[in-house]
Image (cartoon, rainbow, N blue to C red):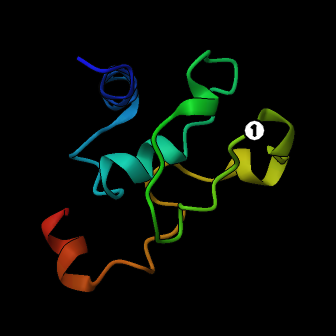
Amino acid sequence: MSLRKAIDEKCKDCIYDPKCGGGTWREQVAQCSVVACPLWEVRPMPGSGPYADAPRLRADVTKEWLRKLVGYANLAHRTAEEQDNGT
């Protein structure tokens, strides 16, 4: 297993909840607020969408960003059908 794959799998296992309806696993991982985690700065991020601009560096984290709800912070990018299906 590659280092990237190992990090992706660890982050996904740690935070992803497919039943919450709060986006893909990458979107949920991008919203991770556990900035003390040694993997936080190298966590997988989506390539586009509303979570692609999540902070990468601890120094860029704001109090406002930390207050966002994981998964439900911004569902506007998802269609009504996706929200109903939980995808």
Q: Is residue 16 above or below residue 72?
A: above
Which residue sits furthest front? Answer: 2
Q: Which image quarter is the N terminus in?
A: top left
Q: Is residue 75 above or below residue 42?
A: below
Mark 1: secondary structure? loop
Q: Which image quarter is the C terminus in?
A: bottom left
Identify the residue shown where x is 83% and y is 48%. 62
Q: Is residue 54 left or right of residue 5?
A: right
Q: Where is residue 54 in the image (x, y as percent from the top left)?
A: 63, 54
Q: Position of residue 79 (x, y in %)?
A: 28, 84
Q: Is residue 51 left or right of residue 6?
A: right
| Numbered circles on residues, count | 1
Q: Say which amino acid is labelled 1.
A: Leu
Q: Is residue 73 above or below residue 49?
A: above
Which residue sits furthest bottom? Answer: 80
Identify the residue shown where x is 75% and y is 38%. 57
Identify the residue shown where x is 45% and y is 40%. 44
In the image shown, does 22 or 39 lie closer to the viewer? 39
Identify the residue shown where x is 60% and y is 28%. 40
Which residue sits furthest left? Answer: 85
Q: Where is residue 14 in the image (x, y as percent from the top left)?
A: 38, 23
Q: In this view, does 52 lie to the left or right of 78?
A: right
Q: Where is residue 63 in the image (x, y as percent from the top left)?
A: 83, 46
Are there few (<14), some (14-19), or many (20+) residues within 10 Å of tag 1? few
Residue that badge 1 annotates = 57
In the image shown, does 8 or 12 lie closer to the viewer? 8
In the image shown, does 12 or 3 lie closer to the viewer? 3
Q: In this view, does 29 lie above or below 4?
A: below
